[in-house]
Amino acid sequence: MTTASAKRTRDRVTVRFDGPTTGRGPATWGQTAIRRALGRLEPDDHQFNIDWGGPVEPGLPVETACDVLRGLLYVHDSLRTLLHEDGDGRYVQELHATGELDVRVADAETDDVESVAAELRHRLGGLRFDYAREWPLRVALVTRGGLVRHVVVVLSHTAVDGWGLPRLVEDITALVAGADPATLRAGRRLSGPMEEAAQQRTPSALRREASARDFVLRNLAAAPTRMYQAPGGGGYRRAVLRCPGLAEAAEACAARLRAASATVLLAAACAAVAASARRSDCVLQVMVNNRFVPGLADLVAPVALEGVLYVPDCREPFDDLVRSVWKASVNTYRFAYYDKDRLTEQSATVPAADTTCWYNDRRGVAAATAADTPDGAAPPGGTARDGLTWSAQEGEQGGITFALHVLDAPGALDLSLTADTAAMPPSVMEKLLRQMAALVREHRAGAFPDRPTPARAGRSTSGGSP
């Protein structure tokens, strides 16, 4: 890593950076999948920008903060990578060895630091990235007394997924403490998506990928063609239910059943979704970290992909459902690292299945997107109450029926549901969230309360009998 300078003006600093590698080649499976997903959301794809950063205590000189940023760009190739579409509709990644990043500097001498940071976060996060021409990160430094007191970072989803952020935190901590970027990088099996793409072309990786596609296709063949009776197109809203003590309840239930809290929450989601759809079965697109795949543990890049979870009977007693979901989810997690373009081509050979219902357990991920924070608006004809808040009308969501997220919150978990209100009216959204939370709480100690039982449904476009 060469020693580079930072050119400073009154309200910004230009950070010159370099890296040890450069190149151009096929995008990874994860890069391609997220880029296509963002393309379907345009012009509202900014809603999936990743909001990161936070307070800096006791404060850093601006030049030190720039050195840390420069080191981070050296360590992680994805932060120096642009994505281009070639003439055949496929994506190509371009890794740059050198470049410049303009960093905003805002003086908060006469204003509240957090207020200034919030305004910058809103401004930087509210703009979509130009994935082919703009570095996949935007940075602003809020200063007071000549020192950086808060760092605002907005990342493109093409550079990292939420599960890659803990590694960035660790590396920033090390760089602030004086670690050598080259030494940090040398300890990684893979340093970026260019190396990941090369690994994906090896015979063993291609065999694993083919097995993953086969598993997904088998699950899709068993899944219903439509989970909800009503067609979409009603516009999207988001509801967030804050659940104090839900994390502890999930852990207690998991300990009693010798399961993981993630399985408990997923089982509760399956039961609540099936009941809301008036079905006995449930199919979910479950986001999978994939960092258990050899070489990916330390990788900062978009490697998470969706696995397909199909549960044929969500009516059984909750303890039994947790066990059933665990058995089904093992292979869902195992077989979620694949070429989605190839899967899409193959999907034409199986009956249509519902792939519009999404679940994402994001606990432990220190990041937010614009889609996470409700504005407190009430649903039509209703009011915000009992821990439930609502967003105003949401933008384009890529044709999903819903996306259900589990998020960390102070002393609580947030259950966040963005849904097409034609398929899932606000009253159904609220009932789903409250039932999911109630199932976990009521079964922490082995109680078996009565709960709504969905109708048994076969494979049909109607979503089962009412």
Image (cartoon, rainbow, N blue to C red):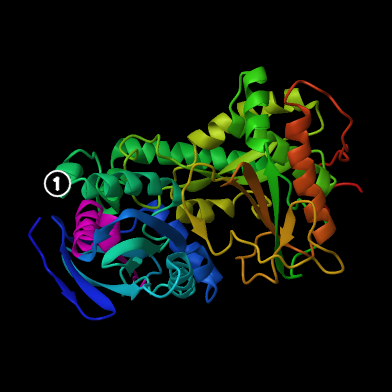
The residue drawn where x is 82% and y is 54% is 428
Q: Taken as a whole, is the magenta stretch helix, strand or loop?
A: helix
> Across the whole image, how many numbered discs are drawn on residues?
1
Asked whether, in this view, residue 193 is left or right of residue 243, the answer is left
Name the foreground residue: 465 vs 242.
Answer: 242
The image quadrant that residue 229 belongs to is bottom right
Q: Is residue 173 shown above or below 123?
A: above
The residue drawn where x is 36% and y is 41% is 206
Q: Is residue 342 shown above or below 374?
A: above
The image quadrant that residue 290 belongs to is top left
Q: Amino acid at mark 1?
A: Asp
What is the secondary structure assignment of the residue under circle 1? loop
Asked whether, in this view, residue 143 is left or right of residue 264, the answer is left
Asked whether, in this view, residue 159 is left or right of residue 359, the answer is left
The residue drawn where x is 86% and y is 40% is 454
Q: Is residue 186 shown above or below 67?
A: above
Name the foreground residue: 430 vs 327.
Answer: 430
Q: Which residue is mark 1?
A: 180
Residue 143, how many percent across, how many down? 32, 68
The image quadrant that residue 200 belongs to is top left
